[in-house]
Image: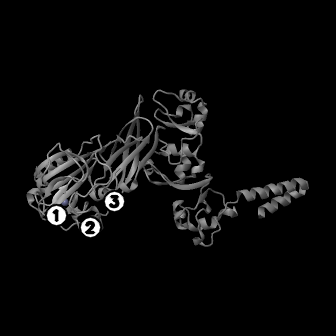
Amino acid sequence: MVNLKAVFANHLKGISLKIARLFLLLSLLSWLFYTPTGLAQQGQQQGPVYIVQEGDTLWEIASRFRVSVEDLQLANNITNANQLAVGDQLVIPGLDGVEGVLTTRQLGYGENLLSLTRNYDIHVETLVRLNRLISPAELYSNSVLILPDASQTISNTQRTLLAPGQSLLELAALHRTNPWTIVNTNDLPATWGALPGDVLLTNSLQGSENGSAAPGALPSEIREVQLNPGRLQQGKAAVLTIVSRDELQLEGSFMDHDLHFFPDGNGQYIALQGVHALAEPGIYPLDLQITLEGEMPFEFSQMVRVAAVDYPYDEPLNVNPTTIDPAVTKPEDAQWAELTAPASPERYWSGIFSIPSPFSREYCLETGECWSSRYGNRRSYNGSPYNFFHTGLDIVGKTGTEIYAAAPGVVVFAGPLTVRGNATVIDHGWGVYTAYMHQSEILVTQGDRVEAGQLIGLIGDTGRVEGPHLHWEVWAGGVQVDPLDWLTEEFP
Ligand SMILES: [Zn+2]
C-alpha cells in the first residue's frame, strides 16, 4: 500500500480528481483481485506461486525448489513455519522468468521433455531450469517433477503423429490449420523443425484430448498407460497396461526381456514382466514399439525406476555337492528357463491363485506357519558367497501330502530333475507359469489341462532338499517372482 499511496499522490498533482478517483478504484480492484488467499499476500516478491499440498512442509517445499527455508519465509512473510495450510499459495523466490501456478506431479510412462513443453506451453529451457535437469534419463517413469498447474495445459488440441515422408505443410493442410500455428504451439524453431515420428499438438474441433497425465509423447491412439510403481521392485511382477480404442501391434523390451502384450478385449493391452530378485536397483529403459494399422512403427523409450526389496539372509545351507555342481545345475537351469519363456496367447487364469496344499489360504496368510522359507531370501550353499536366492515359496508338508494346481492351465512339464526333483510346470497363459518341485509322486502328464485346486502330485524330498516340502514357484515373463503376491493380489 505504500507504493499505491505514492503513485496516488503523484497523480493527484497533475491529473483531474475524476481520473485520479478512477485510477484509485482500478488500483484497489486489481489489488483485491490479485490477492492470493494465502500467505503470498504481501506481494513484495515476484515469482511463480506454489499451492501447498497435503503432507507438504516448509522444509520440503524449500528443498524441492532448492531455496533456503529462510528465503521462502521472507518471501511470504512467514513467521511460524508450522502455520502452513493446504491450499496456501507460496511465492517461490529466485525463479526469474517463471510465472503462474506451479505444482509437483509424478511423471507417467509415455511423456518426455518435448511432450511436457508442448502440453504446458512452457519452454524446454524453463522446464530444465525449474527441475535442475541434467539428463533426459532423469525423466524416468514416476519421477516427481515441478510443472505448471494442470489448468495451464493447452486446450482444444490433439496429439498428431508426423508420419515419415509427411511435411509439416501437409499435416497443417490435413488438420485445416496454419503451419505457423503448429510451429508456435509445439515450440519449433521453424516449419522444418519437426521430424518424422514427432508427436505434435494440432488444433482440434472436437476439444482437448490432452490432460496433464496423458501420455503426450505417444500417438493419440494411446489413451492411457498404466505402470504400477509398487510392482517395479526386485521379485515383483510388473504389469504394463496400454489403453487404446484402436487395433495395435505392440512390442517392447525391459531388463533384457521381450514384453508380450495381449489384448483383454476391453481396449487394454497387457504385458506382465517379472523383475529379477537379484536385479541391481536403478533406472532401466523400457522400450516400446507401437504399430497402428497401415502405418510405420512408432518407437519410444523411457527410463523406469526399479526399487530394491530388503530380502533377508538365510543361514548358510549344506546340500549334496552334486546339486550345486555347475555341470549339473547349468543345463537344468537352462531347460527350466526354456520351459517358462514362451507367452501363450490364451489366458487360463483369473483372480488370485489358490494355495497348492491342504492348508487354507486365509490360515497361511494369517499365521505364516504354512511356509518354512519365503521367496527372495539370499542364500549361500556349502560355504559359497550369497549369490543365490530362494526362487519360490516353501510350503510345509509331509511325504504324501497332496499338491493342487494353483490356477487353471496346461501342464508343460512333468518329470524328474536332479536339483528340482520330481517337478511339474503349469502354463497359465500370457507368460505366467507355476512350478511344483521335490514331489514324491507326479499325478499329471505333459499336455494335461488342469483346474485350480485339482490334485496334481504328492509332496516329497526329491532333488536338492533338506527334508520333505513343496517348493512352489511363480514365473512371469521368464522370471521367478514372489508367489505370496499371487495369493493376495489379482494379476494383472
Ligand atoms: Zn524352496
Residue 93 horizontal side relative to residue 291, left or right: right
**Residue annotated with mark 3:** 308
Q: Earlier in the sequence, mark 1 or mark 3?
A: 3
**Residue annotated with mark 1:** 397
Asked if ligand 1 lies within 8 A of label 2, the reply is no
Residue 235 visible (yes or no) = no
Rendered location of residue 87, percent (x, y) = 60, 62
Dots 1, 3 in contact, CB < 8 A: no
Residue 461 horizontal side relative to residue 484, left or right: left
Residue 319 appears in which quarter of the rendering? bottom left
- From this view, report whether residue 264 is shown above or below residue 420: above
Residue 439 horizontal side relative to residue 185, left or right: left
Residue 173 appears in which quarter of the rendering? top right
Residue type pointed to by label 2: Gly
- From this view, report whether residue 97 is shown above or below residue 373: above
Residue type pointed to by label 1: Gly
